[in-house]
Image (cartoon, rainbow, N blue to C red):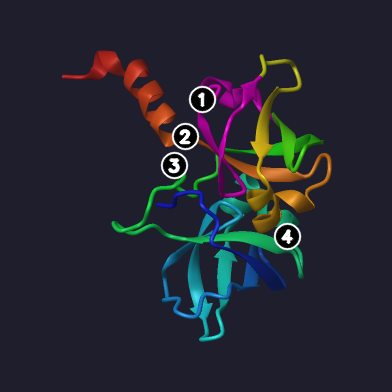
Amino acid sequence: MFSGIIETLGTVTSTEQRDQALGLRIATTFPDLTLGESVAVNGVCLTVAEFDTTGSAWFYVSSETLDRTALGRIRQNHRVNLERASTPATKLSGHIVQGHVDAIAHLARIEPVGESHRITFRVPNTLRGYMVEKGSVALDGISLTLNAVSEPTPDGFEIDLMIIPHTWEHTTLGTLKPNDPVNIEVDVIAKYVESLIRYKGLQP
């Protein structure tokens, strides 16, 4: 489990195309990684398969993950958002994030507002029921608050978020360009509520 509070930006030092899979080596700056631990890379929960004391780590990205996320666009020298898994002592400054991506959203536009930035993403309609104004969402692993949620259209719906200077400077949001894809994960609590309502009649 993660909280959506980005700890650091990593740099992809190499990529390795495999048979329907991808290998990523990332300079994480984490000097005390352990084999098999979970790290969220742009919001995708990946397992440390190799590491060294410099913080360089190797991750295997399966075909399932490539199909459901935007990690397939990652190239050498790309910067990525990194967060290590939460512990019982972790401050939950964001919200509960699993690292299980629900869909890919695309940047629609960016508008400077003073020192902040209002950013708008196009999201598939299948996720509209999980989005509420002032609710939480994770974009590329970043816990963010929804300022506005539009009605569905044939091309999807839009979400607006206000990004403060700290988040803009310490995550990859400031590097995005229009139509760039991002990984989106909705609030898992909303999904549980939906499931309970849908299958209420099956309860003993």
**Considering only vertical position in the picture, is 119 above or below 128?**
below
Q: Which residue is located at x 63 percent, y 72 percent? A: 26
Q: Which region shows up in magenta?
A: 123-149
Label 3 with label 2: CB-CB less than 8 Å: yes
Ranked by sequence position, the earlier of labels 3 and 4 is 4
Q: How far apart are marks 3 and 4 (CA)?
A: 26 Å
Label 1 with label 2: CB-CB less than 8 Å: yes
Q: What element carries label 1?
A: helix
- In this rendered view, identify the residue nearer to me: 135 or 151: 135
Q: Which residue is located at x 81 percent, y 39 percent? A: 179
Which amino acid is tagged 1? Answer: Tyr
Picture quarter containing residue 68?
A: top right
In the rendered image, residue 53, in percent from the top left (x then y), is placed at 51, 86
Residue 95 is marked as 3
**Considering only vertical position in the picture, is 40 above or below 153?**
below
Label 3 with label 4: CB-CB less than 8 Å: no
**Considering only vertical position in the picture, is 84 above or below 190?**
below
Of badges 3 and 2, nearer the viewer stands: 3
* Mark 4 lies on residue: 74
* Mark 2 lies on residue: 187
Q: Please tell me how crowded label 1 is: few (under 14), some (14-19), or many (20+) other residues with Cα within 10 Å.
A: some
Q: Is mark 3 on a helix, strand or loop?
A: loop
